Image (cartoon, helix red, strand yellow):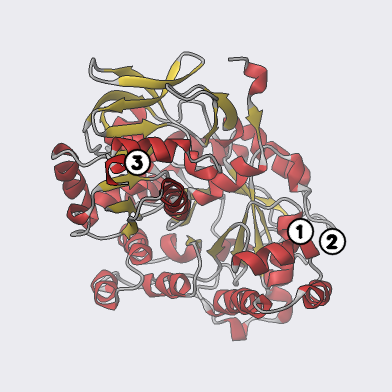
């Protein structure tokens, strides 16, 4: 076997990695100890950060890629995949994360965008990317740039699930709308949502996004996670919801079990018992327009 | 005939789809079911344990009570195919990573596994590999894949990559470090059907 016949970073490998996460929960962690709690609870991957979104929101200022030392310490402490966030358009942060050995980059609106016009050209990287989206057009534009996984933006760091629900309804609703459209109508629809026609056709045919689709942004309880699963997502990201709750171990396990039993209300009731206070959170209606992280990216 | 795909987490749909196509090609009438909870495993004539995160899968299979059902079924001769995480979970012996996470393996196949044998996602790769008995090589897709470091006398090696064992069989158990369900090539799913004795039902 010749080693030069190895192919790295192909579309199949990138999308395949995302597929291995299906049915799982990906948790934000800031220390090796938190990463252990997440792994023990049954997380499929962790997102390595220096602060959870709720604290990033509180701290204000410019939010950037986490300290590589933090990320490396987390990589060394778990066997499950480790993801990390780069600023929108900041291809050098993404390059650094790839060099550190993270398994997937989240080009994230939780950090302050570095480029007001362009997202990262994700096709140039060996490792896969996940990107946020509020509607189908945004999701397909990200996929066109090479995203191997999509998540709703929701409104990170609030513990309010409303925006994630809204974004997922937009995406799923638009996909259902594609059903029954003829070829000309698909062209017009693609133009309207500013997405490439090839991806619109593929989505219409598959009746789902062509890549794995997770929910994120504001998920704080097992019921929130099950709600998103019932809406048809492939899995969930939980950011501040775990380590800003009263009892992170319990909450982490409960959310993993809720994703696995999302259809069974009796089990969900059992899972939701006595978890202590979830994260306090902020109602989105109290946030000003310029405090919304979801408006970042296009 | 009923084939059950363990559907707790990971690449489930792709296995269901590949198996349905393989059945159709072979002209075999069979049902493919997804298994998330206990009590279904004993009703199946063959099982597939797909790829995903082995730490997560192992924990949830225990919690759901599926792990013991799989052990009973496989010990009684029900054929099983494990890919990637499925390979790790079927093994009798793990490596340092398995010990570190306190992961409990099903412990059915006489092999020692090394998790993430090829590194992180950056090192994940596709490469043609020979599969014993196939005329043409198979496009093997490795995603943070494991390998088999050692195997017992009763284990038949089916594929090797650079000297590392990446596919093997022991009686009614078939394991692969790569993901045949991510490709359109159905030969390995057909091989498994044959193993399951499905050819007798045609």
The residue under label 2 is A116
- Disc 1 on helix, strand or loop? loop
Residue occupying image coordinates x 71% and y 61% = A61
| Rendered view: B83 above or below A170 | above
Q: Position of residue A19 (x, y in %)?
A: 52, 50
- Disc 2 on helix, strand or loop? loop
User: Left or right: B173 with respect to B115?
Assistant: left
* Numbered circle sitting on residue B193: 3
Q: Quadrant of the N terminus of chain A?
A: top right
| Rendered view: A16 above or below A132 | above
* Numbered circle sitting on residue B170: none
Q: CA distance from mark 3 to mark 1?
A: 51 Å
Q: Quadrant of the C terminus of chain A?
A: bottom right
User: Left or right: B39 with respect to A131?
Assistant: left
Q: Are marks 2 and 1 on the same chain?
A: yes
Nearer to the camera, B151 or A274: B151
């Amino acid at each position: 076997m010749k080693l030069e016949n190895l192919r790295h970073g192909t579309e199949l490998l990138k999308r395949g990695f995302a597929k291995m996460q299906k049915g799982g929960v990906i948790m934000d962690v800031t220390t090796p100890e938190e990463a252990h709690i997440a792994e023990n609870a049954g997380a499929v991957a962790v997102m390595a950060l220096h602060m959870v979104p709720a604290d990033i929101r509180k701290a204000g200022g410019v939010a950037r890629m986490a300290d590589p030392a933090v990320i490396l310490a987390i990589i060394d402490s778990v066997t499950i995949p480790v993801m990390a966030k780069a600023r929108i358009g900041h291809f050098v942060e993404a390059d650094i994360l790839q060099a550190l050995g993270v398994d997937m980059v989240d080009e994230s609106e939780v950090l302050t965008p570095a480029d007001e016009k362009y997202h990262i050209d994700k096709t140039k990287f060996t490792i896969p990317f996940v990107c946020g989206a509020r509607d189908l057009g945004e999701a397909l534009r990200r996929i066109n740039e090479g995203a191997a996984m999509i998540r709703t933006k929701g409104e990170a760091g609030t513990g309010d699930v409303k925006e994630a629900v809204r974004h997922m309804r937009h995406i799923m609703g638009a996909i259902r709308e594609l059903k029954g459209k003829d070829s000309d109508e698909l062209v017009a629809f693609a133009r309207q949502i500013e997405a490439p026609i090839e991806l619109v056709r593929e989505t219409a045919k598959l009746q789902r996004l062509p890549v794995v689709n997770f929910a994120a942004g504001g998920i704080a309880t097992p019921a929130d996670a099950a709600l998103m699963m019932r809406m048809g997502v492939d899995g969930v990201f939980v950011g501040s919801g775990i380590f800003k709750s009263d009892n992170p171990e319990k909450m982490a396990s409960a959310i993993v079990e809720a994703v696995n039993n999302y259809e069974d209300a009796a089990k969900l009731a059992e899972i939701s018992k006595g978890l202590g206070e979830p994260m306090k959170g902020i109602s989105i209606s109290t946030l000003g327009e310029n405090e919304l992280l979801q408006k970042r990216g296009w | 005939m009923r084939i059950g795909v363990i559907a707790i987490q990971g690449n489930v749909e792709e296995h269901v789809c590949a198996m349905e196509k393989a059945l159709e090609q072979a002209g075999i009438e069979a049902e493919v079911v997804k298994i998330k909870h206990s009590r279904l495993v004993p009703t199946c004539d063959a099982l597939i344990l797909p790829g995903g995160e082995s730490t997560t899968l192992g924990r949830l299979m225990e919690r759901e009570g599926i792990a013991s059902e799989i052990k009973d079924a496989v010990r009684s001769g029900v054929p099983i195919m494990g890919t990637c995480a499925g390979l790790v979970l079927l093994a009798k012996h793990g490596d340092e990573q398995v010990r570190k996470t306190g992961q409990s393996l099903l412990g059915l196949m006489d092999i020692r596994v090394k998790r993430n044998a090829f590194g992180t996602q950056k090192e994940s790769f596709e490469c043609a590999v020979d599969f014993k008995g196939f005329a043409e090589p198979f496009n093997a897709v490795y995603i943070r894949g494991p390998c088999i470091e050692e195997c017992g006398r009763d284990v038949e090696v089916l594929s090797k990559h650079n000297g590392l064992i990446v596919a093997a069989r022991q009686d009614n158990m078939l394991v692969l470090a790569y993901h045949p369900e991510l490709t359109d090539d159905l030969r390995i799913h057909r091989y498994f059907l044959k193993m399951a004795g499905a050819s007798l039902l045609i």
